[in-house]
Amino acid sequence: MAKSKKELSLEEKEQQINILKTRFEKNKNRHLGLDWEKIHAKLKANPSKLWSLHEMEKTGGEPDVVGHDEKTDEYLFYDCSAESPKGRRSLCYDREALDSRKEFKPENSAIDLATEMGVEILTESEYRELQQLGKFDTKTSSWVKTPSDIRKLGGAIFADFRYANVFIYHNGASSYYAVRGFRGSLRV
C-alpha cells in the first residue's frame, strides 16, 4: 500500500512526538497545568494533525502547546520559534496578491502555504497572546490574518515585537521580504 503524501511513517511520528515532548518539558511556562499524556493521546489519535505539526517543524516553526480549549477539548499549538520560521519567509500574503505580481514573484503566498500545511495563520489577538509567553519576532516580522475590509483595499497586516511592545503594521499584500514569514496555529 502506497503511503499518502500527508502521512508520516511510524519512525517520523515517533520522532515528531519526541521533539514535541522535549519542547513541552523544556518550556513549561507556555502550558501551565497541562498534562503531556493527554496531549500525547490526542496526537496519536490524529495522524493528520501530527503531519501538520511535522510540517510546522520542518519549516522552522518549533510548534509547542500554548493552551487547551475546554469547550472543544482541543489543544492549541502555535509556532514558538524565536523568529518568524525560516522556511516560511519571502512570501506575499495570499494567492490574489501573488497572482497580481507581474515580475519578481515569490515562490508562494502565506495563506496558500498555511493551507497546504493544514494550519491557520495567527490572528492579531493570537499573536498578542503568543507574545505573553516570550519574546518573538524581535528581528523579523510575521503576516497575521488580515480583516477582509483591509484585504479588499489591497492591504495586509503583519506584526513584530520591538521596544518591549507588539506592533501591528500594514503593507501591500503583494509585498514580500526576506525577514517576513508567518506563524501558524493548529488545534488538536
Image: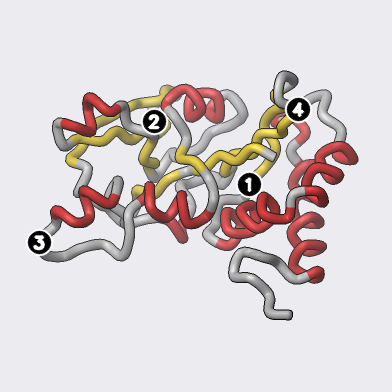
Q: Which residue corresponds to mark 4?
A: 73
Q: Position of residue 108 (x, y in %)?
A: 33, 60
Measured Cα–Cα span from mark 3 to mark 2: 33 Å
Residue 54 lies, with reference to residue 41, above or below; the image says below
Circle on res. 153: none
- From the viewer's side, name the closer residue of 69 and 65: 69
Mark 2 neighbour density, 10 Å: few (under 14) some (14–19) many (20 or more): some
Instruction: Using the numbered discs, state the Cα–Cα distance from disc 4 to disc 2 in whole angstroms.
Output: 34 Å
CA separation in Å, label 3 and label 4: 45 Å
Q: CA distance from mark 1 to mark 3?
A: 35 Å
Residue 101, x across and y down, in percent: 14, 57
Closer to the eye: label 3 or 4: 4
Residue 90 vertical placement versus 33 (above, below): below
Label 1 or label 3, whichever comes before in sequence order: 1
Give the residue displayed 53% in from the left and 46% down from the top: 119
Q: Nearer the viewer, mark 1 or mark 3?
A: 3
Give whichever of 43, 156 is nearer the camera. 43
Circle 1 residue: 63
Disc on the earlier residue, 2 or 1: 1
The residue located at (83%, 24%) in the rendering is 33
Task: Say which quarter of the image contains residue 157.
Answer: top left
Label 1 amino acid? Pro
Whichever of callouts 3 and 4 sits on the residue coming sooner in the sequence is 4
Binning the other alpha carbons within 10 Å of mark 1 as few (below 14), some (14 to 19) or many (20 upward) gives many
Secondary structure at badge 2 equals: strand
Question: Is label 4 in a helix, a strand or a loop?
Answer: loop
Where, quadrant-wise, is the N terminus in this rendering? bottom right
